[in-house]
Image: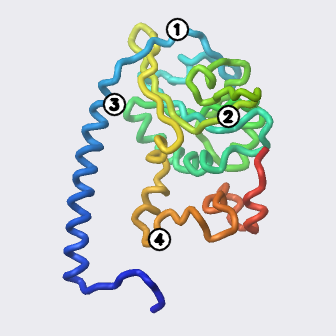
Amino acid sequence: MQTDHPVVSRPQWTVAREALLRREKELTHASDALARDRMALPWVRVEKPYTFEGAHGMQGLDALFHGRRQLIVYHFMFSPDWEDGCVGCSLLADHLDSALMHLRHHDVTVVAVSRAPYARLAAFQARMGWQFDWYSSAGSDFNFDFEASVPQADGAVEERPGASAFFRDPDGEIFHTYSAFERGVERLAGAYNYLDIAPLGRNENGPYFDVRDWVRHHDRYGDTPRQACHDHR
């Protein structure tokens, strides 16, 4: 065996594991408390009309609920001038279809929204084989108002991966309840959780020349590192 990792006896491992387990339990309890605080956040009434283009044409925000009370919008990074969707967002999207049945039976609708034109979203979705509902917010302020797209001083727009949650009451009023961005939505990608208990973890700095190459679009894992890491813009 060739490894520079510490190797100990089973009793020694058990002592170290139990010490770590105590910390893991503390984190679990803290996470439970944080979840309660998240649900207790005040809400903001959504009064501005927004329109989205999807498979069935133009629709308002209320239509995205599909008759349910709760809506989660995943802010999928796909700028209007990009050829491909964000690789990290694609990793998360790979998990979504399998969860939809369970979420829908729990009164939750999940959709993706991006600024790219719908035709480009639909083409990329077909390539990736996804079935979830994906909408274009092109021509709408939605991405900007919910801080998924952030104007920069030089006139460029920074896209941010994130998720926003909404509630619709019996009178049809819609409320914004929560948003998280960047590492705040990692929990939505189950692959991260598997990697976090793997011996080498996420291994985000390799094994290839480019740190972006540790994850790819799922149809590009057979490509060479340089092909897989092409700029999507």
Task: Residue under label 3, please give it.
Answer: 38
* Alpha carbons under labels 2 and 4: distance apart: 32 Å
174 relative position to 223: left or right: left
Residue type highlighted by circle 3: Arg
Q: Which of marks 2 and 3 is nearer the N terminus?
A: 3
Give the mark nearest the N terminus, 2 or 4: 2
Q: Residues within 10 Å of mark 2 (few under 14, many from 20)?
A: few
Q: What element carries label 1?
A: loop
Which amino acid type is shown beneath numbered disc 2? Answer: Glu
C-alpha distance separating marks 1 and 2: 25 Å
- Label drawn at residue 172: none
The vertical placement of 220 against 164, above or below, is below
Q: Is residue 90 above or below residue 221?
A: above
Residue 199 x %, y % = 43, 72
Mark 4 or mark 3, which is nearer the start of the sequence?
A: 3
Q: Which of the labelled discs sits on residue 200, or is there none?
A: 4
Q: In which quarter of the image is residue 204?
A: bottom right
Asked whether residue 54 appears in the rendered view, the answer is: no
Q: Residue 158 carries which label?
A: 2
Crowd band around label 1 with a 10 angstrom C-alpha radius: few (<14), some (14–19), many (20+): few
Question: Closer to the observer: label 1 or label 2?
Answer: 2
